[in-house]
Amino acid sequence: MRGTRAGAARFAVLSIFFLTGFGFANWVVRIPAVQGNLDLSEGLLGLALLGLAVGSLAAMPTIGGFVSRFGSRPVVWTTAIAFPVVLPLPSFAGGLAGLFIALFVMGMMHGGLDVAMNAQAVAVEKEYRRPIMSTFHALFSLGGLVGAVVGGVVAELGVGVMTHLLGAAAVIAVGMFLACRMLLPASADVSESGAPAFARPTKALLGLGIISFCVLVGEGAMADWTAVYLSGTLDTGAGFAAAGFAVFSLMMTIGRFTGDRLIARFGAKRLVRTGATVAAVGLGTSLAFGNEYAALVGFGCAGIGFSIIFPAALSAAGRSKDSAPGPALAAVATAGYFGFLVGPPSIGFAAELLGLGGALYIVVALSALVAVLAKAVGDGAK
């Protein structure tokens, strides 16, 4: 019975990760259309995207506390159903202020769901007693890949942003409802009596938080700026522009599907250092060429390089001896998603001074920093 329960919960969490990636990617590939519809400069678009960051950061500490107090199941239920409800909101925006507010609300639901579903993933991983975290994140990337392809086709067909996102939201809502019914019960990861709702900042968690922040700045940049870089800076069509995030997601998916086995064989520290180096060198070189095909190669290097870094950091947080697993994971996840959400607006602001190609070198520098700090993940999963 225990094995059956764990298997059903694993399938449920895999489905939720996939649907979340699918939904987010459908929004990502329509960013250029929203930018054009509202006639926003890159700097103003960056300001609007800051709403996503502010919303997530407002919700994440509270969601982490809820997970610790009530268990991840009820929190996943709430945020998983709310996410598709708010997904179409940016398409209703009539200007910069409306877009900021819409993205703030979306950020609250998306950020809350990220924390909650990762907490449930850690609980399922403990049931299996072997590394499986990378596979969950592989399904997020696969969802991003499928969402980018679907979104690119829909955009090329000339379907309006509002119609597109409403349709995607309906599909996601049905899938989330079915998946959430199979989650582990709240008792699987609710904190014991007296356990803190928030993790105190230890040296180990600080290192993992910095790594997560750096790599998710990179992931956020690939999500929000690849299409804009290809269509705006390199003057490609909408269909080709969508291929940037698709290639990134494809390579990240491949890396994450193989990540658990590679970590077991070589150790997390070595893989994190190697991946960060591949991302830094590959992306940095491609940006120097300023060519659309070189850009796709660079985005692919970033995808394969980033693929196992964040899952490895989350697994290390779950093994923390200084903090309860749930709060420790929430702390590291929050640091990571802070980078995911504030990185893209920051790159938008930098692009006003350096051009978007120059601003993306921020991702190159942070990838190099991850390579230096790789020892923080340890080799506990080996």
Image (cartoon, helix red, strand yellow):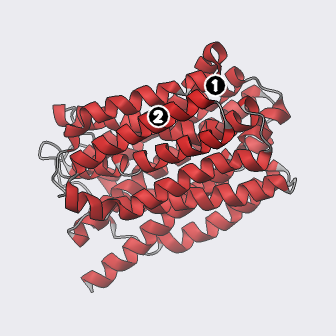
Is residue 55 visible from the viewing direction of this image? no
Mark 2 or mark 1, which has the lower sequence index? 2
Viewer can see residue 96: yes
C-beta proximity under 8 Å, tags 2 and 1: no
Q: Quadrant of the N terminus?
A: bottom left
Determine whether 59 is above or below 255 in the image: above
Residue 85 image position (x, y, % from top left): 66, 55
Residue corresponding to mark 2: 217
Q: Position of residue 177 (x, y in %)?
A: 56, 70
Residue drawn at (36%, 59%), measured in percent from left and top? 134
Q: Amino acid at mark 2?
A: Val
Q: Residue at x 54, y 74 (%)?
A: 178
Residue shown at 54% from the left, 41% from the top: 298
Tell me how far mark 2 sits from mark 1, CA to CA: 15 Å
Could you say whether the residue bearing mark 1 is in a helix, strand or loop? helix
Q: Is residue 74 above or below residue 367?
A: below
How many residues crowd mark 1 within 10 Å: few (<14), some (14–19), many (20+)?
Answer: many
Is residue 105 toward the left or the right of residue 239 in the image? left
Q: Determine which of the numbered discs, if any, sits on residue 340 in the image.
A: none
- The residue most toward the bottom is 1
Q: In the displayed structure, would residue 363 be above or below residue 86? A: above
Q: How far across and down, in percent of the image, does residue 18 sit?
A: 52, 63
Q: Nearer the viewer, residue 359 or 177?
A: 359
Q: Amino acid at mark 1?
A: Leu
Element type at mark 2 = helix
Which corner quadrant of the image does residue 211 belong to? Answer: top left
Q: Which residue is mark 1?
A: 356
Look at the image and tell me in which quarter the C terminus lies: bottom left
Answer with the quarter of the image where residue 231 lies. top right
